Image (tube, rainbow, N blue to C red):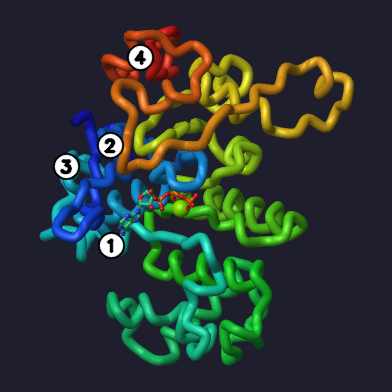
Amino acid sequence: MSGEHLVEVRNLKQYFNVRTGFFRTTPLKAVDDVSFNIGSGETLGLVGESGCGKTTVGRSILRLYEPTGGEVYFEGKLVTSDNITELRKSMQMVFQDPYSSLNPRMTVSDIIGEPLDIHRLYTTKKERKEKVLGLMELVGLNAEHATRYAHEFSGGQRQRIGIARALAVNPKFIVCDEPVSALDVSIQAQIINMFEDLQEKLRVTYLFIAHDLLVVRHISKRIAVMYLGKVVEIANSDELNDNPQHPYTLSLLSSVPIPDPKIARSRKRIVLEGDVPSPLRMPSGCPFRTRCSYATEQCAAECPALTERGAGHFVACWNK
Ligand SMILES: Nc1ncnc2c1ncn2[C@@H]1O[C@H](COP(=O)(O)OP(=O)(O)OP(=O)(O)O)[C@@H](O)[C@H]1O
Ligand SMILES: [Mg+2]
């Protein structure tokens, strides 16, 4: 463990025991041997189809799930169930759905102030109020709204409340789990810009999860692509866009719309055949091989490891 990264994830595994028969449970490998680093002040994008394990990676890093295997280091320190309470102040999460993640019966002031209460981050009521108002201002919320209830707000405003709540404890790292997926396209850009401004102001580090490569590409310095519980490619955002290596990344990129119709027409579209296999019945070898047009016998026999194929460009594929 080098200590130069804020977050290091090593061989993280999260298996859920799912009931598959009357007396039988089968391990569902939601996250299977995932490793990556995130530098201080950096944004790592995490992208992949629904169900590939993105949220589970985020939740396992923050120990909202006890991982089945592997380690997470935060500022060089191994995260354990013993020190997580203390580390929780430094590591926060913004959730996918702003409609269900905020208590509709609590006022904005109470939602944002609750983490301050839990961690006892003020001495007087006046100080608490000032802190809450400061956080509201930081995320562009009107101070007059402090006594209103969460259900009175639109999706974008609710997401601002969720972000202010995450920022209340002054975290160094935030897992942003699809924070704009539930919002109108017109609001998405505003919220993404706000994440960027906050990063500049507060030097906070993000793991930014999305299924939309366009969203992730905009905000991330590096991107990790996930497929069926595994990271199949990690690279710098520009490198991933200009020089994608994994067949799955190629298919994701080919579905991103291009505004110029001439370029769009000349580009080959790769449409994936078949469905994503059930994580309860994983294919042998490479998890992507059942939908990959380059698959060979070797792909069925053995799972390729994530290997460096260029400076900081890692790919898990036998044919690359
Ligand atoms: N608590 C749980 N118990 C059992 N299975 C789970 C649990 N949480 C997630 N899973 C399963 O683990 C796999 C990964 O789920 P996860 O929610 O991490 O995917 P995701 O990439 O975040 O998807 P989405 O884009 O839809 O949010 C899925 O097959 C899901 O059904
Ligand atoms: Mg998710």
Question: How much space separates mark 2 and mark 4, taking CA atoms?
Answer: 17 Å
Which residue appears at 83% of the width and 32% of the height?
259
Which of discs 2 and 1 lies nearer the camera? The answer is 2
Which residue appears at 59% of the width and 73% of the height?
158
Q: Earlier in the sequence, mark 3 or mark 4?
A: 3
Which of discs 2 and 4 lies nearer the camera? The answer is 4
Local secondary structure at mark 3: strand
Q: Earlier in the sequence, mark 4 or mark 1?
A: 1
Q: Can you identify the residue that label 1 sits on?
A: 88
Residue that extends furthest to the right in the rendered view of this protein: 262
Q: Earlier in the sequence, mark 3 or mark 1?
A: 3
Q: Residues within 10 Å of mark 3 (few under 14, many from 20)?
A: some
Question: How much space separates mark 3 and mark 4, taking CA atoms?
Answer: 25 Å
Which residue appears at 43% of the width and 34% of the height?
227
Which three-letter amino acid code belongs to the residue tagged 3?
A: Gly
Question: How much space separates mark 4 and mark 1, taking CA atoms?
Answer: 40 Å
Q: Can you identify the residue that label 2 sits on?
A: 32
User: In this orientation, which residue lies closer to the viewer: 200 or 114?
Assistant: 114
Image marks 2 and 1: residues in contact by CB distance under 8 Å: no
Which of discs 3 and 1 lies nearer the camera? The answer is 3
Local secondary structure at mark 2: strand
The quadrant holding residue 319 is top left
Local secondary structure at mark 1: loop
Mark number, residue 16: none
Q: Residues within 10 Å of mark 1 (few under 14, many from 20)?
A: some
Q: Residues within 10 Å of mark 4 (few under 14, many from 20)?
A: many
User: In this orientation, which residue lies closer to the viewer: 217 or 75?
Assistant: 217
Q: Can you identify the residue that label 4 sits on?
A: 299
Question: How much space separates mark 2 and mark 3, taking CA atoms?
Answer: 9 Å
Residue that extends furthest to the left in the rendered view of this protein: 82
Q: Can you identify the residue that label 3 sits on?
A: 69
Local secondary structure at mark 4: helix
